[in-house]
Image (tube, grey):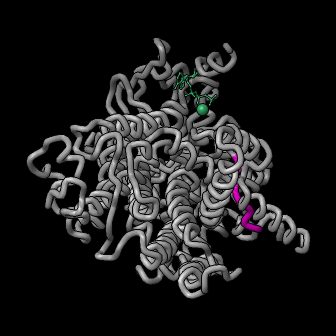
C-alpha cells in the first residue's frame, strides 16, 4: 500500500443495494500516470466503482486509499474532488444554463470558498488556460453558446474539458465516446493518452475499437469483481471473459 | 477586488433600475411635500406609506428570488424573516413611546404593565437605542436563517422537504409569538407607535422620509444581489440550482453556498420588515402566517423568478392589484390570487419579465446571422419549472 507507484488502491470492496451485490470483493490498483481501461458487461458495477471512489456511495466493506494514506471512504464528494480526483459522468452532465466558457471557468482549479468565488476575477493566466482548453476540446467557436445547445458529443468533450480545467491527479472517465462519430472517437483516444502522460486516467468504455486505440492495461469487471487483467488481446482471449460477455 | 466586483454589478440594466429607484425616492416625497393639496401631480398623503409598503414587499420578493430563482431553494417561510425584522423595529418604536403610553409607565410598554410584569425582559434591553435595533433588524433573521440552514443544508434536505420545513418554521414562530408570555405583545403585537428617531411617526415629513429610505434600501439590496448574481459566486449558485450533485463533484461545498445565499436573503427580508412596520404602524403575529410566505412566492413567480427586476415588478403589481381588488370585492381576493398563480404557472411560466426578455432575445436573434443565434445568452429553460426540486 505504501508503494510509491500506487495512486489509487481498492481492496476487498463490497457494496450491495437491497441485498444485490453490485460490487463484490473488488480489488484494484491504479498507478501514477497510468492509463487503465475498464470494460465489462452492463451492470458489471463499473459506474458503481466510480461512485465509491468519488464518495457518492459508501462501501459496505473494504478499503479505498488515495496517495497511500488518504482513506477515501471517510470523505465526501467535495473533499475527494478537492484532493484531485475528477470525474466525467456516464450521462454527460454539464451546467446547461451556463455557457461553454462559464462551465470551464467554474471547473478551473481555483479556491472554492464562497467569498473567494464572489470576489474572483480571472487573471490573464486563467483566461489563457481556458482558451487553451477550448482549443483542445475544439469548442472555441461555441465558447458563448449555452451548454444546453451542444450536441451529445460536444457535451462529452465539454465535460472532458472541465476535467482538464480541474487539473486533477486522477481522472475517472465513464463512457466518454458514447454519441461520438468515429473520427471524434479516435481524437478522444488520442486526447486521453496525451492526458495520461502527466496524470492517471481510468476509462470505462464499451467501444472495443476505442479501447484498442488506448493501448492501455485492461481490467475486466463482471458481477462486481475483477475477472481478468492485462492487454486487450490477452483478456479477450480469456475464456471466462468470453463467457461473461456471451452468457448474458 | 471588492470594488471590481461592485463595478461588475453595475452593468447597464442595474444602472437603469438604480436610477429609477433614486428618481422615485426623490420624486414621490417631493411631490407630496412641495405641491399644494389638490394639485393633479401631487401624491396624496395616504398613498405615500402605501407605496412605501409596496417597496418593502419588493425587497422581500427580491430576497426570496435570490434563494429561489438563483439557487433553487424554494423557501415557504420567508415571511418569518420579514416579521422578525419587523419585530426588532417594533421593539425600538415601543421603547420610544416612553411614559406616553396609556399606563404612563416610564419603561414598560403598555402590554407588559397590563400583564402585571414588573421589569423589562432581558431580550428587550438595548432596543431603546436605534443603532442596536438597526443591527438586530438584520442579525436576528440572519441568525435564525444561519442556524436553520446549517442543519437543513448539511443534512442535504432539499426540494419539497425543505419547503415544508421552512413553512413549519414560520408556523411555529407564529404560534410562539401569539403567546402573551413570550413578551412580544401576544395577539395584538406591537402598535401605537409615537415617534422614530425623534420625529413623529405620523407626520408627512416622516412618512416621506420612510418612503425615501425604503426606495434607497431596495436599491442597496438590488445592488448586493446584482453583485452576487453577476459574479462567479452567482454562477455557482445557478450551478447548484441546476445540478447540485455535479457541483459537489467539482469540489464546491454546496451547503456553504446555500447557507450564504439563505442567510443573506433573510437579512434583506429583515431589513424590508423593519421598514414596513413604521409605515403600516403595527406588527403582529399574523405576519408569520404561512399564507404570507406563499404570497411572496406568487409575487416572485408573477414578476419572473431568476431575474432581479422580476420580483420587484411582481410584488408591486400584485399588491397594487390587491389594494384595488380588495376595495371592490374584499371576499374574493384569495380566489383571485390563486387564479393568478395558476394562470401564470400555465401561461407565463417565466413570469412577466422572463417572458418579455425571451421575446426580446427572440426578436434580436431574428435580426442576426444564424451562426450567432445559439450564442445569444437566452435564459435557461430550466427556470420555467415551478417545482422546487433540483434538476437531478
Ligand atoms: N443506487 C443504486 N440502487 C440500486 N441499485 C443500483 C444502484 N446503483 C447501481 N445499482 C445496480 O448495480 C448494478 C451495477 O450498476 P452499474 O451502474 O455500476 O453498472 P455498469 O457496469 O456501470 O453498467 P453500464 O455498462 O450499463 O453502465 C446494476 O445492476 C445496477 O442496477
Ligand atoms: Mg455505467
* Residue B313, position as x, y percentages in the image: 65, 63
Q: Quadrant of ligand 1?
A: top right
Q: Quadrant of residue B47?
A: bottom right
- Viewer-proximal residue, B230 or B206? B206
Residue A32, visible in the rendered structure: no
Residue B56, visible in the rendered structure: yes
* Residue A22, position as x, y percentages in the image: 50, 21
Residue at 67 percent across and 13 percent down: it is A247
* Residue A194, position as x, y percentages in the image: 58, 59
Residue at 39 percent across and 58 percent down: it is B270
Look at the image and give the residue range highlighted in magenta: B376-384
Residue at 76 percent across and 64 percent down: it is B357
Classify residue A232 as left or right of residue B359: left
- Viewer-proximal residue, B372 or B102? B102
- Viewer-proximal residue, A23 or B339? B339
Classify residue A216 as left or right of residue B143: right
* Residue A137, position as x, y percentages in the image: 67, 62
Residue A188, magenta (yes or no) = no
Reply above or below: A217 against A109: above
Residue at 45 percent across and 77 percent down: it is B209
- Viewer-proximal residue, A10 or A97? A97
Q: Quadrant of residue A101?
A: bottom right
Residue B379, magenta (yes or no) = yes
Q: Quadrant of the C terminus of chain A?
A: top right
Amino acid at each position: 500500500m505504501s508503494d510509491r507507484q500506487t495512486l489509487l488502491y481498492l481492496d476487498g470492496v463490497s457494496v450491495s443495494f437491497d441485498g444485490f451485490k453490485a460490487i463484490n470483493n473488488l480489488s484494484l490498483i491504479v498507478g501514477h500516470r497510468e492509463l487503465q481501461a475498464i470494460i465489462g458487461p452492463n451492470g458489471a458495477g463499473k459506474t458503481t466503482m466510480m461512485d465509491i471512489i468519488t464518495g457518492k456511495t459508501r462501501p459496505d466493506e473494504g478499503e479505498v486509499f488515495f496517495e497511500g494514506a488518504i482513506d477515501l471512504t471517510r470523505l465526501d464528494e467535495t473533499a475527494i474532488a478537492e484532493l484531485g480526483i475528477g470525474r466525467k459522468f456516464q450521462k454527460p452532465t454539464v451546467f446547461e444554463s451556463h455557457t461553454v466558457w462559464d462551465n470551464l471557468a467554474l471547473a478551473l482549479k481555483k479556491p472554492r470558498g464562497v467569498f473567494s468565488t464572489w470576489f474572483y476575477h480571472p487573471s490573464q493566466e486563467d483566461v489563457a488556460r481556458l482558451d487553451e482548453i477550448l482549443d483542445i476540446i475544439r469548442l472555441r467557436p461555441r465558447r458563448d453558446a449555452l451548454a444546453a445547445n451542444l450536441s451529445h458529443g460536444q457535451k462529452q468533450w465539454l465535460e472532458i474539458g472541465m476535467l482538464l480545467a480541474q487539473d486533477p491527479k486522477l481522472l475517472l472517465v465513464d463512457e466518454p465516446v458514447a454519441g461520438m462519430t468515429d473520427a471524434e472517437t479516435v481524437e478522444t483516444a488520442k486526447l486521453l493518452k496525451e492526458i495520461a502522460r502527466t496524470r492517471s486516467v481510468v476509462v470505462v468504455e464499451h467501444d472495443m475499437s476505442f479501447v484498442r486505440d488506448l493501448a492501455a492495461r485492461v481490467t475486466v469487471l463482471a458481477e462486481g469483481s475483477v475477472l481478468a487483467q492485462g492487454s486487450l488481446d490477452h483478456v479477450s482471449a480469456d475464456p471466462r471473459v468470453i463467457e461473461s460477455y456471451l452468457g448474458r | 477586488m471588492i470594488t471590481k466586483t461592485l463595478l461588475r454589478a453595475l452593468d447597464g440594466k442595474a444602472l437603469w433600475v438604480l436610477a429609477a429607484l433614486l428618481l422615485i425616492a426623490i420624486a414621490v416625497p417631493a411631490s407630496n411635500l412641495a405641491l399644494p393639496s389638490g394639485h393633479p401631480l401631487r401624491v396624496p398623503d395616504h398613498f405615500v406609506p402605501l407605496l412605501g409598503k409596496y417597496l418593502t414587499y419588493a425587497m422581500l420578493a427580491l430576497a426570496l428570488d435570490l434563494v429561489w430563482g438563483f439557487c433553487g431553494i424554494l423557501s415557504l417561510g420567508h415571511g418569518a424573516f420579514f416579521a422578525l425584522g419587523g419585530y426588532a423595529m417594533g421593539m425600538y418604536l415601543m421603547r420610544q413611546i416612553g411614559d406616553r403610553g396609556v399606563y404612563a409607565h416610564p419603561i414598560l410598554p403598555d402590554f407588559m404593565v397590563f400583564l402585571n410584569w414588573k421589569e423589562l425582559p432581558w431580550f428587550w434591553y438595548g432596543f431603546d437605542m436605534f443603532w442596536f435595533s438597526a443591527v438586530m433588524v438584520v442579525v436576528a433573521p440572519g441568525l435564525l436563517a444561519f442556524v436553520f440552514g446549517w442543519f437543513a443544508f448539511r443534512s442535504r434536505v432539499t426540494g419539497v422537504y425543505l419547503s415544508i420545513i421552512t413553512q413549519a418554521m414560520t408556523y411555529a414562530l407564529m404560534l410562539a409569538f401569539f403567546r402573551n408570555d413570550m413578551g412580544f405583545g401576544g395577539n395584538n403585537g406591537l402598535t401605537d407607535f409615537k415617534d422614530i428617531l425623534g420625529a413623529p411617526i405620523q407626520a408627512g415629513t416622516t412618512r416621506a422620509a420612510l418612503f425615501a429610505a425604503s426606495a434607497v434600501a431596495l436599491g442597496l439590496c438590488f445592488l448586493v444581489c446584482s453583485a452576487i448574481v453577476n459574479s462567479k459566486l452567482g454562477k455557482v449558485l445557478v450551478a447548484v440550482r441546476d445540478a447540485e450533485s455535479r457541483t459537489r463533484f467539482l469540489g464546491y461545498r454546496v451547503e456553504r453556498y446555500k447557507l450564504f445565499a439563505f442567510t443573506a436573503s433573510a437579512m434583506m427580508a429583515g431589513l424590508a420588515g423593519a421598514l414596513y412596520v413604521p409605515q403600516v404602524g403595527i406588527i403582529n403575529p399574523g405576519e408569520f402566517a404561512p399564507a404570507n410566505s406563499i404570497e411572496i412566492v406568487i409575487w416572485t413567480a408573477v414578476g419572473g423568478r431568476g431575474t432581479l427586476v422580476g420580483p420587484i415588478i411582481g410584488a408591486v403589481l400584485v399588491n397594487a392589484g390587491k389594494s384595488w381588488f380588495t376595495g371592490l370585492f374584499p371576499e374574493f381576493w384569495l380566489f383571485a390570487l390563486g387564479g393568478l398563480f395558476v394562470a401564470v404557472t400555465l401561461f407565463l411560466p417565466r413570469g412577466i419579465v422572463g417572458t418579455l426578455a425571451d421575446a426580446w432575445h427572440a426578436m434580436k436573434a431574428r435580426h442576426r446571422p444564424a451562426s450567432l443565434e445559439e450564442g445569444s445568452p437566452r435564459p435557461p429553460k430550466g427556470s420555467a419549472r415551478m417545482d422546487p426540486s433540483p434538476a437531478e
